[in-house]
Image (cartoon, rainbow, N blue to C red):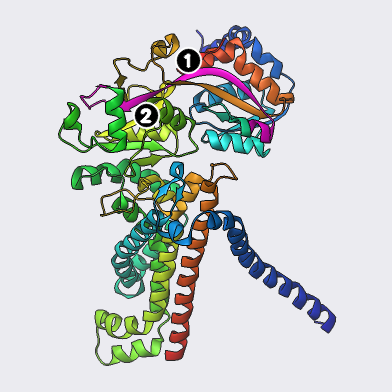
């Protein structure tokens, strides 16, 4: 390629990169700017930890932050053992045919729309939980179980990829020493893949934090921090979906931006965690 | 002897001729028209909007009408911002909303807001005071008001809901709603939730009440079409379709259709009280 053409391509791509980075920053700036009236009206701690009672002038989002963490962490915890088992089977334990089949199934799962899970949750899981465990059925646990299924492909694919990325020489060496399949998996592959698996876990957790529809349909959206798995809760994302219809100039509507900032910060924290793990992984290998 | 297919063909041809005149009336103003109408907002309105849209689009394939929900607040906001052509609301637009957006309101039906429980629930009658205390979280078990010994699951709607606004103002007297209440985003979702939960209490547009949920008499008056119509049941509101400024073109025709004999008939069929 001629230097002038190269220069052109370079600058075009640079512009794209700058634009996408600028958009991310602009979104944060936009949220802060639009949220300013709310922060001026009430104190930071009242928004962060106070109750949500718009008709009394209280716009606290603590109930939503708490609900988000309950549902997302429980979902990740339910998803973890399932994904570990599935990725072990796909990466090494099963025969070639079963592996291929399960792999295809997991990839197919990534394409199922969220609303389908929500719908199935309402008609199958909610009555089951209500009859079996009590409470209204629409609760943290129900949302978490469906969310766990939703995020499982992310976890499984990450786990499987990191297990398969382990240097074949190590595995062969273990095989030569007489290690069977399970031993090779547990003592050679898993320890080497741990970093990649951890980032898969955090990415899936991030997906759980950001999902809207499952919690909106299955968690009940009550504006109180949940006290147990069988209580209803509202996530930040569901809160945004429910409050977005309020008047543009009202404080209720402004509180959406506080929610947005909170979500933004959580996502950034998760991303930083993944980054740090990836760096550690590079350092180890 | 006629073959089966031939006979069906004859029936089809005859029914074409017979049914054509029945379709006449207000709907023929849409003949030769072309374009789209976007409708959003109040969820109580949806059955009527869908039926009207279906009839119009069946008659004229060049017209596309989309119907979305969101709640009254969304309807007013979206039509005001010019995102949709018609924004529905189950409450009158507030004076500041009318002024800000230059809204024109068209009331085409009256609708009650009724308290509903699961049909399996023996409690079918409450006083307003009991209802207030249930929603405030003071009465938290059905056994305290003559039902089974089980906690009450309270369902409510989000702030965008006109149904909620009317219920909160007229039935609860703007009383407190407990923070443990569950939120659902539409009249349809409320019906599904109450129909599936034997211990639920909620409130829906009277037009949405069917056999899957049981209406609860309030101070001795059961919310039905008749009691709302006679004014005996007092928790009622108008159903409005709002436009930004005076409606024009297809939007104007659609609103005229809602107010025509046929449109009003659809409203009545779907369980609302026509205004004409």
Above or below, comparing residue B233 to residue B241 in the picture: above
Let me know if residue B104 is in the magenta part.
yes
Along the line of sight, the residue nearer the viewer: B127 or A219: B127
Badge 1: few (under 14), some or many (20 or more) residues near its Cα, within 10 Å? some
State the residue at coordinates (36%, 80%): A194
Q: Position of residue B148 (x, y in %)?
A: 16, 31
| x then y, percent, for residue B199 | 24, 34
Q: Is residue A91 above or below residue B156?
A: below
The chain that hosts pointer 2 is B
Residue B51 can be seen in this image: yes
State whether residue A84 is above or below residue B174: below
Describe residue A42's horizontal placement relative to residue B55 as left or right. Answer: left
Over which residues does the magenta segment extend? B97-126
Quadrant of residue B228 within the rendered picture: top left
- Report the disc number at residue B172: 2
Helix, strand or loop for disc 1: helix
The residue under label 1 is B269
Quadrant housing the C terminus of chain B: top right
For the point 30% across and 80% down, which residue is it? A185
Q: Nearer the viewer, residue B220 or B255?
A: B220
Compared to residue B180, the image places residue A153 above or below, namely below
Visible residue check, residue B118: no
Counting residues from the start of the chain, the first of labels 2 and 1 encountered is 2
- Secondary structure beneath dot 2 equals loop
């Amino acid at each position: 390629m001629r230097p002038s053409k190269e220069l052109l391509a370079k600058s075009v791509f640079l512009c794209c990169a700058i634009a996408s980075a600028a958009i991310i920053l602009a979104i944060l700036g936009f949220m802060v700017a639009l949220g300013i009236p709310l922060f001026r009206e009430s104190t930071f701690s009242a928004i962060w930890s106070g109750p949500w009672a718009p008709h009394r002038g209280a716009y606290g989002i603590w109930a939503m932050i708490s609900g988000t963490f309950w549902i997302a962490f429980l979902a990740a915890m339910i998803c973890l053992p399932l994904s570990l088992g599935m990725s072990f089977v796909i990466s090494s334990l099963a025969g070639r045919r079963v592996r291929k089949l399960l792999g295809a199934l997991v990839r197919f799962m990534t394409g199922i729309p969220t609303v389908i899970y929500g719908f199935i949750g309402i008609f199958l899981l909610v009555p089951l939980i209500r009859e079996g465990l009590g409470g209204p059925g629409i609760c943290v646990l129900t949302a978490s179980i469906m969310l766990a299924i939703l995020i499982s492909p992310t976890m499984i694919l990450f786990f499987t990829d990191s297990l398969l990325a382990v240097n074949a020489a190590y595995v062969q060496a273990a095989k030569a020493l007489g290690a069977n399949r399970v031993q090779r998996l547990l003592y050679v592959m898993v320890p080497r893949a741990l970093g990649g698996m951890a980032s898969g876990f955090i990415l899936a957790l991030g997906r759980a934090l950001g999902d809207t529809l499952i919690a909106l349909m299955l968690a009940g959206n009550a504006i109180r921090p949940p006290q147990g798995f069988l209580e209803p809760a509202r996530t930040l994302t569901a809160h945004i979906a429910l409050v977005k219809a309020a008047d543009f100039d009202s404080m209720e509507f402004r509180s959406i931006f506080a929610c947005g900032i909170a979500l933004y910060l959580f996502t950034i924290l998760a991303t930083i965690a993944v980054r740090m793990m990836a760096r550690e992984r590079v350092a180890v290998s | 002897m006629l073959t089966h297919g031939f006979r069906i063909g004859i029936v089809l041809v005859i029914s074409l001729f017979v049914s054509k005149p029945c379709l006449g009336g207000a709907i023929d103003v849409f003949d030769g028209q072309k374009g789209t109408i976007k409708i959003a907002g109040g969820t109580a309105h949806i059955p009527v909007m869908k039926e009207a849209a279906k009839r119009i689009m069946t008659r004229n394939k060049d017209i596309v009408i989309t119907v979305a929900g969101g709640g009254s607040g969304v309807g007013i906001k979206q039509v005001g911002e010019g995102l949709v052509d018609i924004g529905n609301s189950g409450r009158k637009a507030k004076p500041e909303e009318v002024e800000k957006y230059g809204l024109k309101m068209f009331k085409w039906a009256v609708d009650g807001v009724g308290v509903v429980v699961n049909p399996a629930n023996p409690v079918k009658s409450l006083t307003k005071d009991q209802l207030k205390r249930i929603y405030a979280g003071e009465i938290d078990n059905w056994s305290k008001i003559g039902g089974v010994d089980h906690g009450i699951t309270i369902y409510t709607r989000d702030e965008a809901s006109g149904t909620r606004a009317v219920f909160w103002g007229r039935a609860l007297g703007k009383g407190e709603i407990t923070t443990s209440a569950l939120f659902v985003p539409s009249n349809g979702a409320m019906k599904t939730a109450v129909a599936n939960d034997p211990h639920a209490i909620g409130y829906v547009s009277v037009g949405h009440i069917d056999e899957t949920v049981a209406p609860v008499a309030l101070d001795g008056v059961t919310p039905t079409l008749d009691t709302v119509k006679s004014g005996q049941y007092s928790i009622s509101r108008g159903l409005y379709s709002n436009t930004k400024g005076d409606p024009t073109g297809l939007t104007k025709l659609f609103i005229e259709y809602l107010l025509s004999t046929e449109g009003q008939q659809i409203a009545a069929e779907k369980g609302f009280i026509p205004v004409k």
